[in-house]
Amino acid sequence: MTLTTEKNGTKLTVHLSGELNTLTASELSARLDAEMGGVRALTLDFKECDFVSSAGLRLLLSTFKRLKAINGSMKLTNVGENFLDVLKNTGLDTVFEVYD
């Protein structure tokens, strides 16, 4: 997985490329831990991400809860059809702000 980030004040955008799976979820988690200081709005761009595993979903949910605790927000953008189906089947499409 390749991660690129853009931080602008309290806003952080992370562009994901590759797969968000059991191995790479820890990489994303570490990157978020390093860059989330002062962040209140997180956007995760899945345009180049072609797979999200259950470990990736758990990380997204824990990150969402972390932001919600500080009245922050998290958006998922460029979500592909397969990932959107997973979000709908798990009910997470009603939890996250999702944009395709």
Image (cartoon, helix red, strand yellow):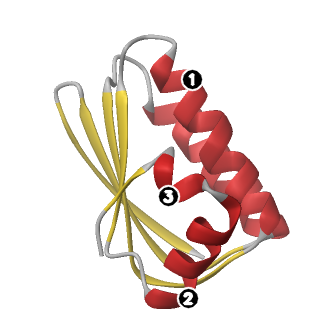
Q: How much space separates mark 2 and mark 3, taking CA atoms? A: 13 Å
- Going from the N terminus, do you reach mark 2 or mark 1 first? 1
- Going from the N terminus, do you reach mark 1 or mark 3 first? 1
**Amino acid type assigned to the residue bearing label 2 in the image:** Asn
In the depicted structure, whether residue 6 falls above or below residue 1: above
- Which residue carries the number 1 mark? 66
The quadrant in which the C terminus is found is bottom left
Residue at the outermost top position: 70
Q: Nearer the viewer, residue 90 or 20?
A: 90
User: Could you say whether the residue bearing mark 2 is in a helix, strand or loop?
Assistant: helix
- In-image side of 5 versus 29 (left or right): left
Q: Are marks 2 and 1 in contact (CB under 8 Å)?
A: no
Q: Which mark is residue 11?
A: none
In the depicted structure, whether residue 38 falls above or below residue 43: above
Q: Are marks 1 and 3 in contact (CB under 8 Å)?
A: no
- Which residue carries the number 2 mark? 82
Observer able to see residue 18? no
Q: How much space separates mark 1 and mark 3, taking CA atoms? A: 18 Å
User: Could you say whether the residue bearing mark 3 is in a helix, strand or loop?
Assistant: helix
**Amino acid type assigned to the residue bearing label 3 in the image:** Asp
Q: Nearer the viewer, residue 43 or 32?
A: 43
**Amino acid type assigned to the residue bearing label 1 in the image:** Arg
Q: Which mark is residue 93?
A: 3
In the depicted structure, whether residue 24 falls above or below residue 83: above
Mark 1 vs mark 3: in front? 3
Residue at the outermost left position: 8
